[in-house]
Amino acid sequence: MVLSQARKGRGPQSSAGVPVWAEGREISPRRPALPGSASADVAIVGAGFTGLWAAYYLLKEDPALKVVLVERECAGFGASGRNGGWCSAIFPVSLDRVRKMYSHQAALDLQRAMNETVAEVGRVTQDEGIDCDFAAEGFMSLARTPAQLARAKATVSGTEAFGVRGQWQLLNGEQARTRINAEGALGGVYTPHCALLQPDRLVRGLATVVENLGGTIYENTAVTAIDKGQVRTVHGTVTAPIVIRATEAFTPQFADYRRHIAPLYSLVVATAPLPDAVRKDLGLDSRIAFNDLRNLRIYAHPTVDGRLVFGGRGAPYHFGSKVSAEYDVDSRVHSKIAETMREFFPALADVEITHRWGGPLGVPRDWFPSIGYDTDSGVAWAGPYVGDGVATSNLAGRILRNLITGRHDELNRLPVVNHASPRWEIEPFRWFGVNAGLRAAGAADLEERLTNRPSRVSALLEKLTGAH
């Protein structure tokens, strides 16, 4: 896997733009490009988690299928190999918004499916012998201000009243600090429905499993158009009655899908391995995923080799939905992420940041992921996942299998199936709107620090987007 080098804001030369997940392994040669025109039963555009999970479940269902994946870079090049390592049951839209858009039962079914998906990923990694450091120890969201504590209590009471019993457990300050000893922790919420994993190992292992099942992956093959029954590339055309678009944040690069998705960048840092005594003192000797209940999302976890991975949003949306390697490292945003990490853990004030990287994730206009299949055109799709795709892409793979093969399953009735999001505004309105939303989330956190009350700006944002 060849990873891009950012052209600005570099940290150490060895780590600029390169995820910590690539540490300690040799760069494998890329797979061959498409040698010319070909045919298949199913052609998949994109060899990240979505495309690979879809191929995996299709081939498990029907080993006779000829499945071809076409990838511009290499398997796992995008968010699948660059994410923060969470496999969580988080859905980007609140259950109450799902209820309003569909039904109360649909929201309950969706959350149950997301919870079960975390376990399904663990089952497959075990069954297929994929060593990706999978550890299902849950996720904790800390409350570090009075406003965040109020949000924690509302989260637990709200989900219980909604009918999702036991989804979240409320923690007091002592209980929270016992798990993650972060500065200023007043309490928090915990859910068991989250696992940590090494995403690069998972995506590379899954690609190998797909090939062993009979699938074919062509890398270094840029797709120029996705049509009914055809995937046109720079090296030839793959003809197939069924085409799956699994392109996540890169979707707007196709003219027909220019306004379907807005790419947003999420950036991450990783520390050098921490001394055992420091890890124990800070509660970083477990495999629990954690963040706090701020509005501008952050995410963190301790790795198997003793590092702390810490990431967050806040990087600007780029005009025209542009995606570029130069955005993988942003010195201003990476510095703010490192500063936030040190606010959590003052004892890490002098710790070395060894890796700085990032990548784009896809956001639909209503923040609601979609998985579907148009039987008339033969085109199927899945995503985007608004940054919560490690688990959701597995769910997508199983749903795509069902829709394509005609398998009857309760998953086919989930509200994500054939969900139609509105299109993003044309530029420059998209640029103004998305970046204004990012600034508003940051302003909401400042408001809460000043008032010690849940932000009115945050409440308005959630009302407008349904995101939580």
Image (cartoon, rainbow, N blue to C red):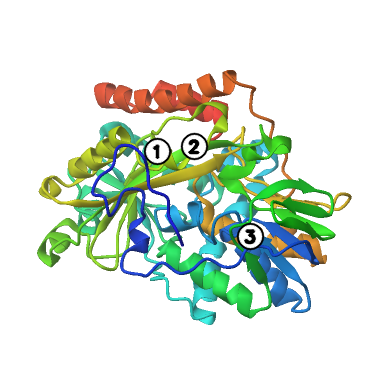
Report the side of 76 relative to 438 (left or right). right
Q: Earlier in the sequence, mark 2 or mark 3?
A: 3
Q: Quadrant of residue 99?
A: top right
Report the side of 295 relative to 309 (left or right). right
Residue 38 rendering spot, x and y as whole percentages: 78, 64
- Packing grade of label 2 (10 A; few <14, some 14-19, many >=20) is many
Q: Residue at x 69, y 43 (%)?
A: 103
Q: Report the residue marked by disc 3.
A: 51
Element type at marker 3? helix
**Vertical position of residue 127 compared to residue 226: above or below:** below
Q: Residue at x 76, y 72 (%)?
A: 66
Report the side of 456 relative to 446 (left or right). right
Q: Nearer the viewer, residue 44 or 9?
A: 9
Q: Nearer the viewer, residue 428 or 220?
A: 220
Q: Nearer the viewer, residue 63 or 283?
A: 63
**Vertical position of residue 14 compared to residue 161: above or below:** below
Which label sits in the foreground, 1 or 2?
2
Element type at marker 1? loop
Cα–Cα gap, marks 2 and 3: 20 Å
Q: Residue at x 42, y 50 (%)?
A: 4
**Vertical position of residue 366 compared to residue 369: above or below:** above
Q: Earlier in the sequence, mark 3 or mark 1?
A: 3
Element type at marker 2? strand
Q: Report the residue marked by disc 1.
A: 313
Report the side of 422 relative to 437 (left or right). right
| Proximity of marks 1 and 2: CB atoms separated by less than 8 Å | yes
Q: Report the residue marked by disc 2.
A: 264
